[in-house]
Amino acid sequence: MEKTKITVANTVNADTKKVWNYWNQPDHITKWNFASPDWHCPKASNDLRVGGKLSSRMEAKDGSFGFDFNVIYDEVEPQKKISYTMEDGRKATTTFEDLGDKTKVTTSFDAESENSVEMQRDGWQAIIDNFKKYTENN
């Protein structure tokens, strides 16, 4: 059975070096890696290399729900591309397209079967939009 792929993207008004650093450094990840203002990312670690692990904790600020997001990197091409496998076997790829003083960030990922495609797309898009806002304002 072929997996459904979902793609989200946004163009960030910052150069690729800054975008790459803000996307990958744990002290930045904790400031943007959530889909809505009532959630947060209290901790993150990132071993950015093939075979390395990204781990982040996402939870509701009121403590009512939370989960760990863990991936293993399959491909790391600095300032250009990251591919990884999630714990449930789904794959994702994020590309960083250098547009001079802007960078287009695009993530394509395998959909999961628990939530609707629309809900997943909206959630991941909200995170990438949050990343854009954080990166442009810091």
Image (tube, rainbow, N blue to C red):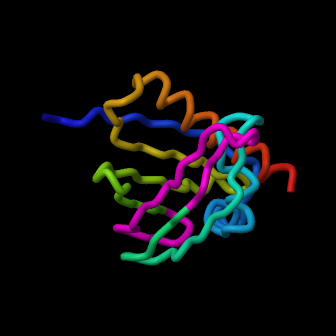
Of residues 48 and 19, which is closer to you in this image? Answer: 48
What type of secondary structure mainly makes up the magenta span? strand
Instruction: Report the quarter where the N terminus lies.
Output: top left
Q: Which residues are magenta?
A: 56-80
Which quarter of the figure has residue 113? top left
With 97 as the anchor, is 130 left or right in this view?
right
Which quarter of the figure has residue 130? top right
Of residues 57 and 12, which is closer to you in this image? Answer: 57
**Percent position of residue 106, x then y:** 51, 45
Instruction: Report the quarter where the C terminus lies.
Output: bottom right
Residue drawn at (47%, 31%) of the image: 120
**Percent position of residue 126, x then y:** 63, 34
Location of residue 138 with respect to 126 vertically, above or below: below
Tell whether position 75 is magenta.
Answer: yes
Residue drawn at (53%, 64%) of the image: 55
Tell whether position 125 is magenta.
Answer: no
Residue drawn at (46%, 62%) of the image: 81
Residue at the front extreme of this rendering: 64
Location of residue 66 with respect to 45 vertically, above or below: above
Location of residue 14 with respect to 38 vertically, above or below: below
How many numbered discs sit on the rendered protein? 0
**Percent position of residue 4, x then y:** 29, 32
